[in-house]
């Protein structure tokens, strides 16, 4: 897709994050199964359900733009997921593996926070209030998920791994 206008850029961003969310839905169950922390596994399962809702919101944003929902390859999210796959294969200590996978989950959250924050601003600039509201809701969920992961890391997972 040739990006010529701000609307094109916004649409490309939506396609990027749509692809990322779909990949995340595929990956969370594997990560939740690999970790050795009930709190972390439960947090991941909860966020999996949120992510499914975020995909539905993105589909509404596509509708607002008069476009069909479709993703474009996102090398950033693919790289984070690939790194997690490698860590699962290479790390034998379950506590260390759990800490590493939690860090990877936070990398995903940080990526999403940056993307949704940008998309919110672009929606405002494009006077697309409906999309802004939808994207803001997702941004708030991503920030809350990151905070929850930080709490689990600091109070449980990282201490056990150390």
Image (cartoon, helix red, strand yellow):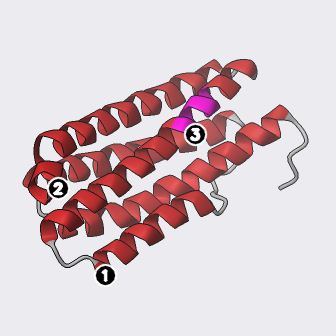
Residue 85 in the image: x percent, y percent?
38, 74
Q: Secondary structure at mark 3?
A: helix
Residue 89: which numbered mark, if any?
Answer: 1
Q: Earlier in the sequence, mark 3 or mark 1?
A: 1
Furthest-bottom residue in view?
A: 89
Residue at mark 2: 41
Residue 116 in the image: x percent, y percent?
55, 35
Give the label, 1 or 2, closer to the camera: 1
Q: Is residue 81 above or below residue 61?
A: below
Q: Secondary structure at mark 2?
A: helix
Residue 152 in the image: x percent, y percent?
17, 43
Q: CA distance from mark 1 to mark 2?
A: 19 Å
Q: Can see residue 16?
A: yes
Q: CA distance from mark 2 to mark 3?
A: 25 Å
Q: CA distance from mark 3 to mark 1?
A: 29 Å
Residue 125: which numbered mark, if any?
Answer: none
> Between residues 14 and 152, which one lies in front from this camera angle?
152
Q: Main secondary structure of the magenta part?
A: helix
Q: Quadrant of the C terminus?
A: bottom left
Q: How many marks?
A: 3
Q: Is residue 37 magenta?
A: no
Residue 1 in the image: x percent, y percent?
83, 56
Residue 53 located left or right of residue 17: left
Q: Which residues are magenta?
A: 114-120
Residue that appears at 52% across and 22% down: 133
Q: Secondary structure at mark 1?
A: helix
Residue at mark 3: 115
Neighbour tally class for label 1: few under 14, some 14-19, many 20 plus, Cα within 10 Å: few
Residue that appears at 63% across and 33% down: 119
């Amino acid at each position: 897709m040739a990006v010529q206008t701000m609307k094109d850029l916004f649409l490309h961003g939506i396609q990027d994050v749509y692809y990322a969310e779909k990949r995340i839905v595929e990956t969370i169950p594997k990560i939740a199964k690999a970790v050795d922390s009930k709190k972390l596994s439960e947090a991941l399962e909860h966020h999996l359900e949120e992510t499914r809702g975020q995909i539905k919101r993105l589909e509404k944003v596509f509708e607002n733009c008069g476009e069909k929902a479709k993703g474009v390859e996102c090398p950033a999210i693919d790289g984070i997921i690939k790194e997690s796959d490698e860590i699962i294969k290479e790390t034998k200590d379950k506590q260390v593996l759990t800490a590493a996978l939690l860090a990877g989950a936070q990398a995903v959250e940080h990526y999403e926070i940056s993307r949704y924050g940008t998309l919110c601003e672009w929606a405002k600039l494009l006077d697309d209030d409906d999309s802004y509201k939808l994207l803001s809701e997702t941004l708030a969920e991503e920030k809350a998920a990151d905070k929850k992961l930080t709490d689990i890391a600091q109070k449980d997972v990282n201490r056990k791994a150390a």
